[in-house]
Image (tube, rainbow, N blue to C red):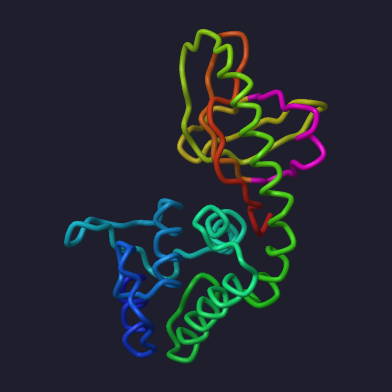
Amino acid sequence: MTLYELMNEYAIANPTPPEQESRTPELGMNLSLLHSSLIECDLENEEQGGAPRLTASPDDIEPSHLSHFIVAYLPFNSVTEKAEINHVLFEIYSFFDWLNKKNIPHGLAGTNISQLVKQLCTKQERCLKLSQLLDNESGRILKDPPEIQNTLNDTFSVEKIEGSFVSLKGRRHDDIVRLRLPPDALPLIKLNDCLDLILGDTSEKWVVLEAGQVYPQVGK
């Protein structure tokens, strides 16, 4: 069964009020959030009934997908109160526990999900601050925009940190990009952080044109 089908089966067995503003109201609010987050992570999906549905297998889920969901996706999607976040996370934990009880293999089967969630929650503040600083840098650049030769829109992994520069590798681009960071961002960035960026090539250097989510890549 696909991830969407399993989420839908869980939602039928454990009904919650439908989330009408979601593209998957039948899953309820919490699983709808996870479903959308996994699509943002480029897990396999297809259009069904006018909305994307995950066609990926539960084996395709990785710890880093949970990192994206907890550290980056929830704060950017109006789920900010601690009690609300805890409610969402409990529902997600319950879904994976349900998979385990039904002996359905999945990519987090060997992961202590409760412990991983606690670890990721401690990284949220750092990543949100870094995202804000990168967004401030893009605002500075766009006040007096340079001539841009090329742009890259991707989720980049931090491969190396050298002084005030980071080497980034995109999810969809193989070439390494070397980017100079503002001084206040340097203490916050870590190896294997994932940065959702639009970068511009001025022919002399790369600059940040737009910054979005930041989250740690788990398992490295």
Above or below, 59 against 210 in this view is below
Tell me: 52 left or right of 85: left
Residue under the point 74% across and 62% down: 122
Residue 167, x across and y down, in percent: 67, 30
Quadrant where the image shows the C terminus: bottom right
Q: Which residues are magenta?
A: 178-193
- Quarter of the image with the N terminus in it: bottom left
The number of numbered discs placed on residues in the rendered structure image is 0
Q: Quadrant of residue 25?
A: bottom left
Q: Residue at x 53, y 31 (%)?
A: 210
Q: Position of residue 161 (x, y in %)?
A: 76, 33
Q: Quadrant of residue 17?
A: bottom left
User: Which percent across, then down, holds residue 51?
Assistant: 24, 58
Depicted 49 relative to depicted 164: above or below = below
The answer to which of 80 and 73 lies nearer the viewer is 80
Magenta stretch encompasses residue 191: yes
Q: Quadrant of residue 90?
A: bottom right
In magenta stretch: residue 216: no
Name the foreground residue: 41 vs 144: 144
